Image (tube, coloured by chain):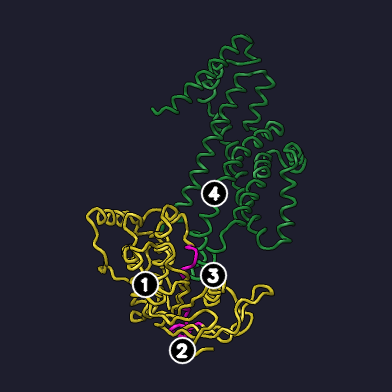
Chain colours: A yellow, B green
Amino acid sequence: MIVFRSVDFSYGSSPLISDLSFTVEPGQVLALLGPNGSGKTTVGRLALGLVQPTKGTIEVAGCNEGTPIPKAAVFQEDRLVESLSAVGNVLLVTQNSLAAHLPDRHPARSRRPQRDAVPAPVSRNEATNRISSLKNEDPRDSLVKANVTRAEVENELIAAGLPVEHHTKPVSELSGGQRRRVAIARALAHGPEILILDEPFTGIDAETLLQVRSYVKSRITGCATLLITHDETDAAAFGARTVPFGKVTDSRGESR
Amino acid sequence: MTKRPLRVLLAAAVWLLIWEIAALAVGKGFVLASPVEVVFSLVNLVPTPDFWLTCLYSLGRIAAGFCIALVLGVALAWLSTLAAWLRDFISLPVRAISAIPVVSFIILVLIWADSSLLTVTVSAIMVLPVVYSNVLEGLDSLDPKLDEMAAVFDLPRVRRWRAVVFPQLYPYLRAASRTGLGLCWKAGVSAEVIGLPSGSIGEQLYQAKIFLDTPELFAWTAVIVVLSFAFARLVLWLLACSKKLALRGLA
């Protein structure tokens, strides 16, 4: 759950956000709609705890009191580790991730893809490539012995619309849209309870957009999600409360 | 054989021919030794145990100096990122070291310490500023957005260093090593020629000079070039391995 209470924020002496209040319950999507420079991204940064409000309070609570809250974000820039592959970027945040330590019936865990739940058909060549890459895995590898397997990560990437042949390439060799899909898969594979999606579909071509949107929708059922966008169709696709930024309502739809 | 190695081989052959002709023209082996004389000198040197002990002495000390500079340079660069006053405090002497002539250090070490410490100390001192400035530049240019990403996804500290920080620092470490490796051999052997630590390559070069044994002087120079090249390859290979190790399972 994300709760903003009368939050002000300013960069130096210039105020950017003033008296902002809203609540996002688990399973809800709140879309902040507004033009560039209106402070939407800053709201996301505030929710993630990357910056502190100058006034007011922000409460970010998880399902299990007293345990760390699994948070994830699709940043406006991809923020991928360039020297890693697509699989590596996802593995980086999923090994020993907070959600992996949660009970089996926890919503953040139940969103994890299953080993046999490959949503797209895989060609013979692709299957061979995947098997050989799995065979090459060193079982002693300290970064791969954790809870999310490479196969599960590959399923996540396939579901995000990234073809198998791009899974093991360094992300620096991927196109903007492909990198975006890796960033989305990374955030969702982390099993977050708090999810910030900042212009998540920028650069994704129209053909893949529907698949990626439905993938994201299927994975965020238990998350308190903040969708930051300037595109009303994104908000509509998620059935989100569509709130022009600056006139944000709380979870009951009351204006503040 | 591809075209480039063939061209390089041909160029080397032509230069050796020019050298041979020049040596024949001079006609005095103690002024300019011919390539054939140098090869004979090497053939005489290599089978002796003393040759290998001498190589090992200088290689060991120069390698130790390089490793000390690498560790110290990285540590000082990291300390410099902690506070502005600390950066100024550390940068000043490091900049001074890079401006001071190597000979001054050699003399100071000979005054203050034993000549057996000379090679290690001088190699380390000459490489330290290179490592420090390169690594500091790398630390300054670390992407703060990736750091935020790591914080949001709650990456453990060790994994952050291995997978996020180290790959960004790697090109700077590699550049520092490439420059530092050449420098430590030049400085180290120069120090040995002046300080004459017993059993070093520098001592052998000095002996060759005293006895006007130019073929042996050339032979030892060739040995230095080979050792320096091999050591550089080894260090760069180890660095590449360390990157692979850091990203193991994620690449």
Q: Which residue is mark 1?
A: A216
Tell me if mark 4 has few (under 14), some (14-19) or many (20+) residues whose alpha carbon lies within 10 angstroms of its own: some
Q: Is residue B151 left or right of residue A164?
A: right
Chain letter for mark 1, please.
A
Q: Secondary structure at mark 2?
A: loop
Q: Position of residue A195 (x, y in %)?
A: 45, 75
Judged left or right of residue A66, residue B88 is right
Find disc 2 in the rendering and name its residue. Answer: A253
Query: The residue under label 1 is which amino acid type?
Result: Val
Disc 4 marks which amino acid? Pro
User: In the rendered structure, which segment of residues is drawn in magenta?
Assistant: A60-78
**Dot 3 corresponds to which residue?**
A36
Q: Is residue A126 visible?
A: yes
C-alpha span from label 1 to label 2: 24 Å
Kindly check if marks 3 and 4 are in contact, taking CB atoms under 8 A apart as contact: no
Instruction: Check if residue A68 falls in the magenta segment.
Output: yes
Q: Chain of mark 4?
A: B
Q: CA distance from mark 3 to mark 1?
A: 24 Å
* Marking on residue B171: 4
Q: Reply yes or no: does residue B46 show up in magenta.
A: no
